[in-house]
Image (spheres, rainbow, N blue to C red):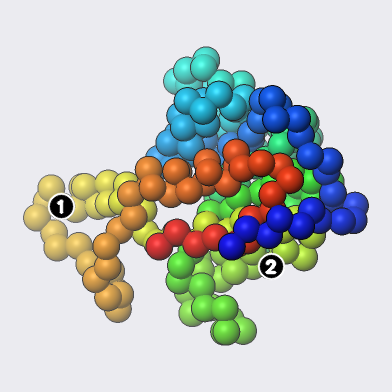
Amino acid sequence: MPDTNSPKGPHHRAPKSPHHRASILVTGATGNLGREVVDRLRARGAHVRRLVRHESGLSSDAETVVGDLTDPTVLRAALLGVDAVFFIWPLLDSAPAHHVVAELAAAAPRVVYVSSTAIDDEAPRQSDPIVQVHADMEALLHDAGLRPVLLRSDTLASNARGWAGQLRTGDVIAGTDVARTAVVDERDVADAAVAVLLAPHHTQLAAGRTC
């Protein structure tokens, strides 16, 4: 349920005008999920800023900052004046994220982080290294006082494209020791993300989960 109590402390922001045009930073904006988020935000009239590593091939329909997410100078420029951040951590190690999260905390936007349904909240350590990175990232964001909204997604449907080469050669594709499960359409995850990113700024939503 939404928590409508405004947060207090160093990261508190005053409510925006009802006519305020939201400014959203989208990381991973050229990925299968990020592109869907960008398209939906623009359709809803938000000002979108993309943080990308390479600008070539991008359309000019959204503001773009080119550079590495882990570069503090690039990240500060990307965060300037934004209300919210759609955050995907691209590395298999959470250690470089400490200063990234510090920059997010300094800018104090609403953060929507794409995590994993595989996280076991009762386990001191996760059984899978990728899931452990997601758990570490969630902890970093919470410890920084950002009150992130966590979109714990299952496997995205577009990941299946990575198996195309093997399928063409006739290979059978199966995950090791993983039960069969339905994948998640990234358009559904994007819809959930955009709903939170554009929610009224006086509303603090509880952590969410997309199955």
The residue type indicated by label 1 comes to Leu
Most foreground residue, 79 or 191: 191
Q: Is residue 129 above or below residue 67?
A: below
Which circle's residue, 1 or 2, is located before the other in the chain?
Answer: 2
Q: Quadrant of the C terminus?
A: bottom left
Query: Does residue 32 appear left or right of residue 9 in this picture?
Result: left
Give the quarter of the figure containing the N terminus.
Answer: bottom right
Under circle 1, the secondary element is: helix
* Residue name at image x 52 percent, y 57 percent: 151
| Residue 172 percent location from the top left of the image | 14, 63
User: Which label belongs to residue 167?
Assistant: 1
Q: How many numbered discs? A: 2
- Which amino acid type corresponds to the residue marked 2 in the rendered image? Ala
Q: Is residue 139 above or below residue 179?
A: above
Q: x%, y% of residue 210?
A: 45, 59
Residue 52 to residue 182: above or below: above
Q: Which residue, given by chain and number where applicable, does mark 2 sit on?
A: 139
Q: Residues within 10 Å of mark 1 (few under 14, many from 20)?
A: few
Q: Residue furthest right?
A: 10
- What's the residue at 58%, 59% (across, down)? 150
In this view of the protein, which residue sits in the foreground, 144 or 99?
Answer: 144
The answer to whether residue 138 shows anywhere in this view is yes
* Residue 46: percent from left, percent from top: 59, 27
Of residue 149 and residue 93, the one placed in the foreground of this image is 149
Say which of 84 and 92 sits in front.
Answer: 84
Residue shown at 72%/63% (left/top)? 142
Which corner quadrant of the image does residue 175 belong to? bottom left
